[in-house]
Image (cartoon, rainbow, N blue to C red):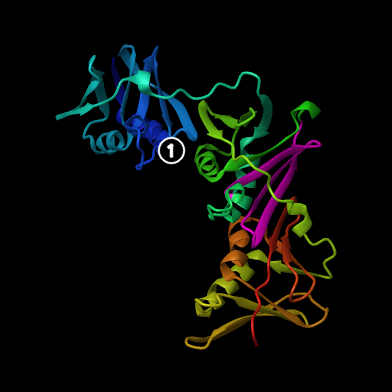
Amino acid sequence: MKFTISKQSFLDALQQVQHVVSNRTTLPILSNVLIEAVGSELKLTTTDLDVGVSGSVMADVEKEGATTLPAKRLVSIIRELPAENVEISVDSKNYASIKSGPSFFKIIGLGEDEFPPLPKFEDAKEYKMSQELLLDSLKKTSYAISTDETRYVLNGIFTSFKEGKVTLVATDGRRLAMVENDLEFPASNEADVIIPSKAVQELQRLLTDKGDVIIRLSDSQVAFEINGSLLVSKLIEGNYPNYRQVIPNNTSERIQVSREAFLETVRRVSLLASDKSNSVKLAFGANSIDVMANSQDIGEASEKIDVTYGGAEFAIAFNPDFLMAPLKNLDTDEIYLDLIDEMSPGVIRIEGSFLYVIMPMRVTN
């Protein structure tokens, strides 16, 4: 195999697939990137057996062939090369010679036959969705995915294709983020799946705000076709909890507040939240919210926000990180706080199909 390629386009293509490669693998082949030179392009593929990514890049192919090379090492070499073009030739023993300007490297690869193939999706259910919509939905929900490995069904985004809607839900048991959008698909394609966290991260890297993504579902795998790249992933098996039952549907108070101002205030006040209780208190009074934090060994902070509010006076406390997470990932000017009392979950909503449920914290006065 022999080809010449621009350093930058090779580096970009490698970086698009290298994140899947695990440093802690027992199978040496899984540390490698599969490089296939065919026609006038290179196809690059990586996998950790749970998630796989492939993409292609134009190259001047002198001799077709395939090999696998250590992905992270190859990226660090290509990044440091001095010239604009790179020439790579691979011999029958999978020794790759890399030349660029005055530089020369030789690295040892492994045969492509050992590389596990990505799964095929022949009889899969298929959906077409705008990349921008999927990216926006992931941004609004993915921060709420649980990292607790003992509750593995929560280690991903629940994705439901039902009744002409696609619903994305993430929860860690203490907060829940949900986005629902209309999507056209045949009734026979209705399905509920859980897409693991690692695939969600890769997806957010690959998606852009232009064009469509093709989603294919088999019984245990999902594939995303994006701008000539392919991402495949195993699905999380198990039953996702009934998330609809934790969404309060009879909130008594609705307060409209500027998202940016609220975020900045909570961020400032939370500087004096104690590590032990880690909470900020929102006290609602006539046309104002007092945002407060105090800890016996540090001190206290408070800041008032003007709002339109004429309801009962009450106070509720939340984890400040959980309160700020949706505010950072939304882009609307205004949000709505829907509340019942100091002991019930609070809900953040916007004009549109998003909601965020957050459990209150008990605090002593």
Which image quadrant is residue 58 in? Answer: top left
The residue positioned 41% from the left and 40% from the top of the image is: 19
Regarding mark 1 in the picture, which secondary structure is present there? loop
On the image, the x and y values in percent for residue 59 come to: 36, 20
Does residue 162 appear to the left or right of 232 in the view shown?
right
Q: Quadrant of residue 351?
A: bottom right
Specify the principal SS of the magenta part.
strand
> Looking at the image, is 30 positioned above or below residue 308?
above
Q: Position of residue 152 (x, y in %)?
A: 57, 48
Q: Which residues are magenta?
A: 155-184
> Can you say which quadrant of the picture contains the C terminus?
bottom right
Name which residue type carries label 1.
Val
273 or 362, which lies in front? 362
Residue 40 drawn in magenta: no
Read off the residue under disc 1: 20
User: Which quadrant of the structure image shows residue 46?
Assistant: top left
Alpha-carbon neighbours of circle 1 within 10 Å: few (<14), some, or many (≥20)? many
Asked if 343 appears above or below 188 in the picture, the reply is below
Q: Residue at x 43, y 38 (%)?
A: 20
- Is the N terminus in the top left, top right, bottom left or bottom right quadrant? top left
Residue 335 appears at what percent x and percent y? 71, 63
Residue at 73% in and 46% down: 180
* Residue 176 colored in magenta in the image: yes
Side of 304 where 120 appears, left or right? left
**Which residue occupies the foreground of this view, 339 or 99?**
339
**Picture coordinates of residue 179, whole percent (x, y):** 70, 49
